[in-house]
Image (cartoon, helix red, strand yellow):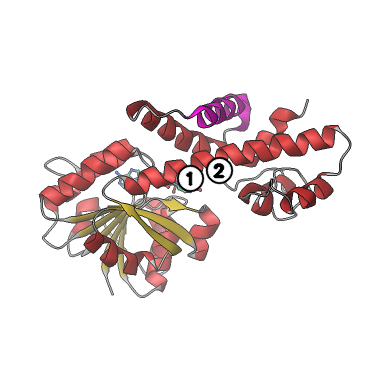
Amino acid sequence: MAKIAFIGLGNMGGPMAANLVKSGHQVTVFDLVDAAMDAVVAQGANKAATALEALAGADTVITMLPAGKHVAGLYLGDGGLIAKASTGTLFMDCSTIDADTAKRVGEAAAAKGLQMLDAPVSGGVKAAQAGTLAFMCGGDAVAFARGKLVLEGMGKNIFHAGDHGAGQIAKICNNMLLAVHMIGTAEALQLGANNGLDPRVLSEIMLNSSGKNWSLENYNPYPDVMPTAPASNEYKPGFMVQLMLKDLGLAMENSLVTQSSVPMGSLARSLYASFSQKGNAQRDFSAILEMFQS
Ligand code: NAD
């Protein structure tokens, strides 16, 4: 069993750390917000007063932070995790951040002889609680083989995408595609409804035709087609518009760096930005269907 330092215990990190405790690992937690640690400590984790205190004695360090600046701030510099870690430490950053920062931090760890994976997740808070997250990892094969044993305590599908930063690239590609097929699904269902079709019937037809896709199958954006979907529960998240917008922003930034043509992703980002500005930032991302209702 690993001795794990888990840093960043928000909506995702809290339940992820709790699952590692349940898997039998020795877990020490730290978050800037004291209250965020309580639920995990109640389940058997140890509490540290600082990130460096959590690091001391850990063989594996997992971080789940909001954005790239938080990750760079914690890992890099003279007082950072990389500078202070002992030989043999494995770092796994599960945050969704820009691939450049993931690469920079991963290479800084490698330069000190430490193992590091960027390991962003797919699946929201429910998957974090259920231990069914998907992990997309970037780093070398040795670090991946070691990290996978720990990630299995928090998820089901664990992929090795490539070298440092590759996990983050896989994540932005996936979420850009998710945004595009969610919007496409919403506009198709609304077009049908505008013509008097029952969205339940239309959904069934498309599920058995070439329009079948993940959003239609698991996350129908039209209210009352799928009782468990956010659309049938006042679009309570789920996966918030502001998080989708963050991921689309990362995809667009990367497309500039790599001079990639991403017209569908670019339009999806604009639509989500406009929808978010109209007071929808914290609603589920499938609420974008309302943009097509007038
Ligand atoms: P969150 O804001 O709820 O949690 C982040 C936590 O990090 C907070 O508790 C904050 O206090 C802590 N933190 C920030 N800086 C810190 C530092 N220097 N030291 C210690 N703690 C620090 O965010 P979340 O919803 O848990 O998401 C975390 C990451 O996972 C994000 O990158 C997000 O994009 C990604 N993600 C979220 C979801 C989701 O559905 N919420 C799904 C997939 C991926």
Q: Which residues are magenta?
A: 262-280
Mark 2 C-beta to ligand 1 under 8 Å: no
Query: What residue is shown with label 1?
Result: 174
Looking at the magenta stretch, what is its main secondary structure? helix
* Residue on which disc 2 sits: 178
Write down the quadrant of residue 37 in the picture: bottom left
On whether residue 192 falls in the magenta region, the answer is no
Q: Find residue 276 and report its horizontal and vertical position in percent.
A: 58, 29
| Residue at 27% over, 38% down | 101
Give the residue furthest to the right: 196
| Residue nearer the viewer, 110 or 13 | 110
In depth, the one of 85 and 291 nearer the eye is 291
Q: Amino acid at mark 2?
A: Leu
Q: Secondary structure at mark 2?
A: helix
For the point 26% across and 50% down, the residue is 163
Left or right, residue 209 beside residue 20: right
Q: Crowding near pointer 2: few (<14 within 10 Å), some, many (20+)?
A: some
Considering the image in quadrants, where does the N terminus appear? bottom left
Determine if the magenta segment contains residue 267. Answer: yes
Q: Is residue 17 above or below residue 197?
A: below
Find residue 249 and report its horizontal and vertical position in percent. Answer: 44, 31
What secondary structure is marked by label 1? helix
Q: Are marks 2 and 1 in contact (CB under 8 Å)?
A: yes
Quarter-of-image position of residue 24:
bottom left
